[in-house]
């Protein structure tokens, strides 16, 4: 449980900081950005935990899909979110998924 919470907070902070400095995701309020970061971090953390029980490539694809769908979901359901369809957004989503997988692996290895 501690590993999941640590991974969730780490991913949420990274999402917040990158989007606060970047310009590919436009948000109206700071509170909305915090809420969106928490939601995307939670979705990706749970997908990484579920993907651990699947085959290697299927689990990694699940994390990438969760990062993309989490970001698209907050753009659809939270008011004020607008995602630019540019290469920077796609690179961020890919890098975010890879970072989530790496953080999950590091935390699980430290537990053992």
Image: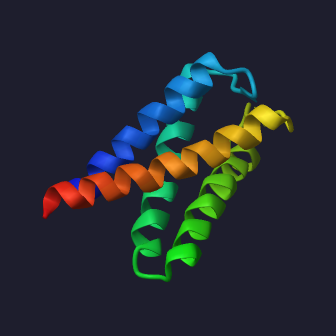
> What residue appears at the point 50 percent right and 82 percent down from the top-left corner?
55
> What residue appears at the point 58 percent right and 30 percent down from the top-left corner?
32
Q: Nearer the viewer, residue 38 or 86?
A: 86
Residue 36 rendering spot, x and y as whole percentages: 56, 39
Kindly give the residue lying farthest to the top in the view shown: 21
Which image quadrant: the C terminus? bottom left
Q: Is residue 12 above or below residue 4?
A: above
Work out whether residue 1 can be spotted: no
Q: On the picture, is 80 further left or further right than 10? A: right
Residue 35 rendering spot, x and y as whole percentages: 51, 37
Q: Is residue 56 above or below residue 60?
A: below
Which image quadrant: the N terminus? bottom left
Residue 80, quarter of the rendered image = top right
Q: Nearer the viewer, residue 98 or 51?
A: 98
> What residue appears at the point 29 percent right and 52 percent down from the top-left corner?
106
Kindly give the residue lying farthest to the left in the view shown: 112
> What residue appears at the point 56 percent right and 44 percent down from the top-left corner?
96
Residue 27 rendering spot, x and y as whole percentages: 69, 26
Work out whether residue 19 can be spotted: yes
Q: On the picture, is 77 further left or further right than 97? A: right
Kindly give the residue lying farthest to the right in the view shown: 85
Residue 33 rendering spot, x and y as whole percentages: 57, 29
Name the colouring of the figure.
rainbow
| Tag count | 0
Q: Is residue 30 above or below residue 83?
A: above
């Amino acid at each position: 449980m501690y590993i999941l919470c640590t991974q969730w907070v780490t991913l949420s902070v990274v999402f917040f900081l990158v989007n606060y400095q970047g310009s590919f995701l436009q948000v109206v309020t700071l509170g909305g950005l915090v809420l969106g970061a928490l939601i995307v971090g939670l979705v990706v953390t749970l997908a990484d935990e579920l993907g651990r029980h699947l085959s290697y490539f299927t689990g990694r694809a699940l994390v990438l899909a969760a990062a993309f769908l989490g970001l698209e979901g907050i753009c659809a359901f939270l008011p004020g979110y607008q995602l630019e369809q540019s290469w920077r957004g796609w690179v961020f989503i890919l890098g975010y998924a890879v970072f989530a997988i790496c953080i999950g692996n590091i935390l699980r290895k430290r537990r053992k």
